[in-house]
Image: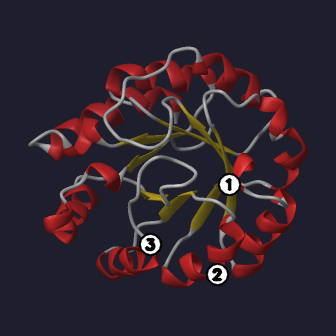
């Protein structure tokens, strides 16, 4: 067993006071920060780029888990790593040469991940599992925060765990209640946005998460 990590998703943070938001969840005991990068093409939303990642890096030493929901992510791997990304996760549907992109991520010195959309079968990423440090299972359709958890993704997590021994992250509708289901299935990184940043007392909700994760670490 390994320590379950809790990674607040900055997509749900108040960007007008982002540094304060980061310091608050870091002081409350989170383990990493999840940063969603969207280009308006691969998903119907536009968020941030390397400049914001660089600004985040200046205010925290926490690992930065950068999720690239963009077309042709290989073009930006170097920029995001230079900005401070520790983990870089791509989508198999968005890259022409997935293995080349994964190798570029590792060449830059970051950990490499692939994300699975709800409608993407596990078989689509099986050829790349030996190259991966992380698989991110989306339990909502990517693009917007605050969506409801899709329980049918639990089966995918359970099957993935039988084939993959490294980190499995889950993002989408994760709160202390849904966390139990994904942890039991084999996940060990919980990405939570509105469940953390949508609450006035972030320390309290992180304690609730940690209480849930205790038996799985």
Q: Pointer 2: what residue?
A: 78
Q: Mark 2 or mark 1: which comes first in sequence?
A: 2
Q: Earlier in the sequence, mark 3 or mark 2?
A: 3
Q: Secondary structure at mark 3?
A: loop
Could you give the CA–CA distance between mark 3 and mark 2, rounded to whole angstroms?
A: 12 Å
Q: Is residue 206 visible?
A: no
Residue that numbered label 3 is attached to:
49
Give the CA separation, mark 1 to mark 3.
Answer: 18 Å
Q: Is residue 158 above or below residue 141?
A: above
The secondary element bearing badge 1 is classed as strand
Q: Check disc 1 and report the residue beneath it.
A: 113
Q: CA distance from mark 2 to mark 1?
A: 15 Å
Bin the neighbour count of mark 1 within 10 Å (Cα to Cα): few under 14, some 14-19, many 20 and up.
many
Q: Quadrant of the N terminus?
A: top right
| Quarter occupied by residue 86 | bottom right
Residue 184 in percent (x, y) is at 56, 20
Q: Residues within 10 Å of mark 2 (few under 14, many from 20)?
A: some
The residue depicted at 77 percent of the width and 78 percent of the height is: 107
């Amino acid at each position: 067993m390994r320590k379950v990590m809790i990674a607040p998703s900055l997509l749900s943070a108040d960007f007008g006071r982002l540094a304060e938001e980061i310091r608050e969840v870091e002081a409350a005991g989170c383990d990493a920060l999840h940063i969603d990068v969207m280009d308006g093409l691969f998903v119907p939303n536009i968020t941030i780029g390397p400049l914001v990642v660089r600004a985040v890096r200046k205010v925290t030493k926490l690992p930065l888990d950068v999720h690239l929901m963009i077309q042709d992510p290989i073009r930006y791997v170097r920029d995001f790593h230079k900005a401070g990304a520790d983990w870089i996760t791509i989508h198999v549907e968005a890259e022409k040469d997935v293995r080349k992109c994964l190798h570029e991520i590792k060449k830059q010195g970051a950990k490499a991940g692939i994300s699975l959309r709800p409608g993407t079968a596990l078989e689509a990423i099986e050829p790349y599992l030996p190259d991966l440090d992380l698989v991110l299972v989306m339990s909502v359709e990517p693009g917007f925060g605050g969506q409801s958890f899709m329980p049918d993704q639990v089966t995918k997590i359970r099957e993935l765990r039988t084939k993959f021994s490294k980190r499995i992250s889950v993002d989408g509708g994760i709160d202390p209640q849904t966390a139990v289901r994904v942890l039991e299935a084999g996940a060990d990184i919980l990405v939570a946005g509105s469940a953390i940043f949508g609450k006035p007392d972030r320390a309290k909700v992180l304690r609730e998460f940690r209480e849930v994760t205790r038996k799985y670490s």
